[in-house]
Each structure stands twice: as C-alpha cells, then as structure tokens.
Amino acid sequence: MSDPSAKPDTAVIISAKDEADRIGATVTAALAIPGVDLVVVVDDGSFDDTGRVAKAAGARVVRHSRNRGKAAAMESGAEAVRLFDEEETRHLLFLDADLGDTAGEAARLIEPVRDGSADMTIATFSTRVKLGGHGFVVRLAREGIKRASGWVATQPLNGQRCLTRAAFEAARPLAHGFGVETGLTIDLVRKGFRVVEVEVNMAHRATGTDWHAQLHRARQFRDVALALATREQALANLKRPTRPPR
C-alpha cells in the first residue's frame, strides 16, 4: 500500500448515470485512496440526484445534458482532469459509480502504474457477482482481444483501470460506448504498452435479468462487436500489400 503522505499523483474519473444511491460512498472511498487528490464524476444525463450527491461527497462534477455513453463520459472526465493538471502528470484511474466502499481497493491498481511496471492495469474481481446472460458478451470481447492482439484477458470488460496519461492519449479516439474497454486493451497492446491485470476485492451491482438488463447486454454486444470489427479491419488494411505505381 502507498504511503498516505505521498505526493498526490492520481485522479479518479467516474462515469455515472442514475447512481445517486451509491455514488456518495464511491466518491468518499476513492478520495481516501493514497495519492488521489481529485475525483471527477461525469453525470451522464442522470434523472436523479447523482450530480448533487457526488458534489456533496467531494467530487468535481461534469454534467452531460443527455446520456452520451461511457466512452464519451471517460473523454469528458479526462478533459476535466486536464483543466486541473496543466502539466498532465496525473495517472488516470477509471472506476464504476456503483462500487461503494469497495472503491478503496482500487489503490492496488495504481501501484504498478506508479512504479513504472505497467502502463495500464485492469482489475479482476476476486469475488464474482451474478452476471446473468452477460457471459456471451465477455466471451466475445475475450476472444476478439486475443485474435486482434494476442493478449488474453481474464475480465475483458472490467471498467476499473488505471493508466498513464500518455497511454490514455495513445488510445484516443476511444471506441464507442460499451466497446471502450475492448478497444482500449487492443489499441494499447498493439502499440507496445504494458497491460497488467490486478486482482482486487471489489464488488458492484449484479446484472439483472429483466428487459432493461437484456437491453443493456444487447447494447454491450453491439458496441463490443463494433470495436472489434473496426480494429480487425484496420489490421487487415495494414497487412494488405500496396500496389506499386504504374
């Protein structure tokens, strides 16, 4: 664990939509992580008090007037951090809004980035939550990442990630929507950045099985498939021989 007196070097970015019941605890736990001096919550078109609760807990809040999706929220959060960090030296720690008190475990994700042994870390949850039919999207992402980059991910869709500012900039523009994690992994591995998985004792809300959950999974599948198709096409274009001029 880091020295609590260490100089702050990490900013937390949390994308949130209608998470008023959990965002306060998540922000509080994130602010207690050694080395974290800034938490930015991107309120992505919430209809509840997510933004107000996050601000009361100590976060800087950026609001989208309408829901723009996870990738756009991550971009907005990173730009907000840039406003407070002109030298762009902070590492970026992305967390889900519904982690609650377990967000403090993200300290483990920062360490390999801080000591220079990784450019991006990805959390693997030691305790799995019930995922319903979510497994088929995970398989799509895992197999697609392996096919596109050769790297095998344990939990390819896990959104808890810490990365250097340089790695984040190298991965832009981010893949659309819920394809962002898949795209991030492929793009950084292909470009030679070091990606490491770190086991953490975190937990978030279990995915349900009602029609809202089914629609969410369908959107995930669509966005992951799009991220994979785009990158596979880009790789095919690179491998395609060019014809010499006549």
Image (cartoon, grey):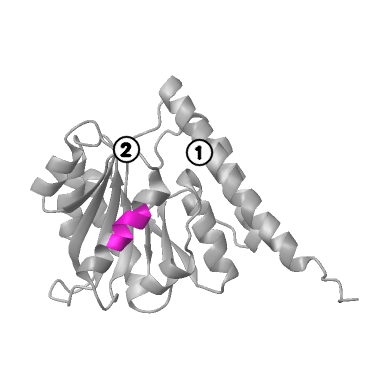
Tell me the SS state at disc 2: loop
Q: Which amino acid does the dot numbered 2 rest on? A: Arg
Q: Is residue 75 above or below residue 209?
A: below
* Residue beneath the point at 18% across and 62% down: 38
Q: CA distance from mark 1 to mark 2?
A: 19 Å
Density class for disc 2 (Cα within 10 Å; few <14, some 14-19, many ≥20) is few
Relative side of 194 to 129, left or right: right
The residue under label 1 is 220
Queried whether the magenta region covers residue 77, the answer comes back as: yes
Q: Which residues are magenta?
A: 74-79
Q: Are marks 1 and 2 in contact (CB under 8 Å)?
A: no
Which mark is on residue 66? 2
Which quarter of the rendered picture does the C terminus lie within? Answer: bottom right
Query: Which residue lies most toward the front here?
Result: 246
Q: Is any part of residue 155 visible from this angle?
A: no
Q: Residues within 10 Å of mark 1 (few under 14, many from 20)?
A: many
The residue at 20%/58% (across/down) is 39
Examine the residues drawn in magenta and state their main secondary structure. helix
Q: Quadrant of the N terminus?
A: bottom left
Residue at 39 percent across and 50 percent down: it is 72
Of the residues under marks 1 and 2, which one precedes in the sequence? 2
Q: Nearer the viewer, residue 17 or 105?
A: 17
The quadrant holding residue 224 is: top right
Rendered residue at 72%/67% (across/down):
238
Residue 230 placed where, x, y %?
63, 53
> Residue 97, how many percent across, how many down?
28, 44
Question: Could you say where residue 127 lies in the image, as x and y percent from the top left?
Answer: 38, 44
Query: Where is residue 16 drawn, in percent x and y?
Result: 28, 43
Q: Residue furthest top?
A: 210
Between 216 and 207, the one lying in front of the other is: 216
Residue 184 appears in the rendering: yes
Judged from the image, the secondary structure of the residue bearing numbered disc 1 is helix
